[in-house]
Image: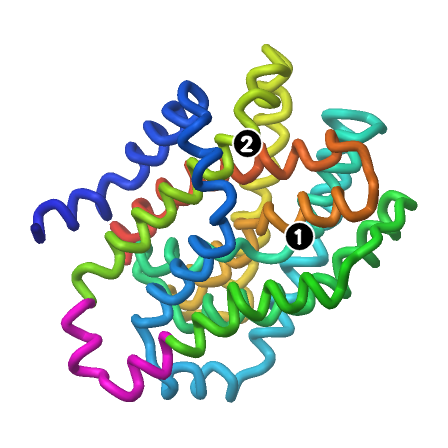
């Protein structure tokens, strides 16, 4: 069993590529999971939060400056990068607007898992993720309006409730369990990265399934959209590496890398649908989701070897 768990964790990159291909060939598998994305995300947050306790969280909260840096990097340079790559690849129109929207999005919920696999500071990643995600319904519409002139209608109450249920509640529950019963929970440590990886692959299927027809329908032009997503993703790692200017600890820099480079795609679809925008505006977010879920295991593997 330990060998199987280690294989799942160590081969996440290959498994992600295989899962992406499977999702395109058999989209029905992803369609089944798509209705349960919120549950999968909540379970992933819970699993990751079992790896650190309240003391680790308190240590992070004593240095609020790092949260301000994270907010600035996630929403500042990345928003501009989304707008620039959108103009470069698509000019104007729905795809350009969608690429800009990707740049303004908060951190993807799966970021702490990749930080765990990369041997980074998971508690820091989880706190940074929680804060910038909860603030996203207020920040994203303002940035998107400033960059595109398009107003997003945001169901603020519904989105905040969902984010609390998906991000905050599972995180608090996991931390409380780790704090209250540290020795019992510690016995699960060898299985937690593999469990998170399996949830990660399920999320990848859930993303590709509903979007398989759209992705394949673009034909060769899908490569252009994917390239735009890849470049924005790589810019995210470059922006995240600016943490080296104010952090010396490798584990904390790793947390910033994934906090900045990974974007929460599901919020984009909700914003687009509620605002009555063309569905094509949500397409770049779907492509970005697939790209980041393939590149981030590679980044985590490379970082873990240097740790």
Give the image location of residue 140, x and y in percent: 75, 57
Give the SS element for disc 1. loop
Residue stretch in magenta: 174-188
Q: On the rendered structure, is 281 left or right of 117?
A: right
Q: Nearer the viewer, residue 225 or 138?
A: 138
| As drawn, 40 above or below 176 | above
Q: How crowded is mark 2: few (under 14 residues within 10 Å), some or many (20 or more)?
A: many
Q: Is 75 or 268 nearer to us in this picture?
A: 268
Label 2 residue SS: helix
| Prevailing secondary structure of the magenta residues | helix
Q: Which residue is drawn at 24% across and 52% down?
A: 194
Does the residue at mark 1 contact the one at mark 2 (Cβ under 8 Å)?
Answer: no
The residue beneath circle 2 is 210
Residue at 21 percent across and 44 percent down: it is: 8
Can residue 74 be seen in the rendering of this structure?
yes
Q: Where is residue 87 in the image (x, y as percent from the top left)?
A: 79, 31
- The quarter in which the C terminus is drawn is bottom left
Tell me which corner region of the image, top left, top right, bottom left or bottom right, holds residue 54. bottom left
Give the alpha-carbon distance from disc 1 to disc 2, as whole Å.
20 Å
Above or below residue 307? Residue 160 is below
Q: Quarter of the image holding residue 183?
A: bottom left
Q: Can residue 121 be seen in this view?
A: no
Crowd rating for badge 1 (residues with CA inside 10 Å; few <14, some 14–19, many 20+): many
| For marks 1 and 2 on the same chain, the one whose residue lies earlier in the sequence | 1
For disc 1, the marked residue is 105
Give the left or right position of residue 201, taking residue 275 as reference.
left
Residue 196 x/y as whole percent: 32, 54
């Amino acid at each position: 069993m330990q060998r199987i768990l280690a294989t799942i964790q160590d081969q996440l990159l290959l498994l992600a590529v295989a899962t992406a291909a499977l999702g395109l060939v058999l989209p029905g598998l992803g369609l089944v999971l798509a209705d349960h994305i919120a549950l999968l995300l909540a379970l992933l947050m819970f699993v990751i939060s079992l790896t650190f306790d309240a003391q680790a969280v308190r240590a992070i909260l004593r240095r609020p400056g790092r949260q301000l840096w994270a907010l600035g990097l996630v929403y500042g340079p990345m928003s501009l990068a989304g707008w620039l790559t959108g103009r470069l690849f698509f000019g104007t129109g729905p795809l350009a607007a969608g690429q800009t929207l990707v740049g303004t999005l908060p951190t993807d919920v799966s970021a702490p898992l990749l930080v765990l696999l990369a041997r980074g500071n998971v508690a820091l990643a989880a706190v940074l993720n929680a804060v910038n995600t909860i603030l996203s319904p207020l920040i994203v519409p303002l940035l998107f309006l400033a960059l595109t002139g398009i107003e997003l209608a945001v169901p603020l109450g519904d989105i905040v409730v969902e984010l609390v249920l998906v991000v905050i509640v599972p995180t608090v529950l996991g931390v409380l369990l780790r704090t209250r019963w540290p020795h019992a929970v510690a016995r699960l440590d060898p299985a937690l990265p593999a469990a998170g990886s399996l949830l990660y692959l399920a999320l990848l299927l859930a993303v590709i399934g509903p979007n398989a027809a759209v992705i394949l329908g673009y034909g060769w032009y899908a490569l252009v959209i994917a390239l735009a997503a890849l470049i924005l993703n790589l810019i995210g790692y470059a922006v995240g590496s600016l943490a080296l200017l104010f952090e010396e600890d490798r584990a904390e820099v790793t947390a910033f890398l994934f906090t900045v480079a990974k974007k929460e795609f599901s919020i984009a679809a909700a914003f687009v649908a509620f605002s009555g925008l063309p569905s094509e505006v949500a397409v770049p977010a779907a492509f970005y989701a697939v790209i980041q879920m393939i590149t981030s295991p590679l980044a985590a593997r490379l970082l873990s070897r240097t740790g």
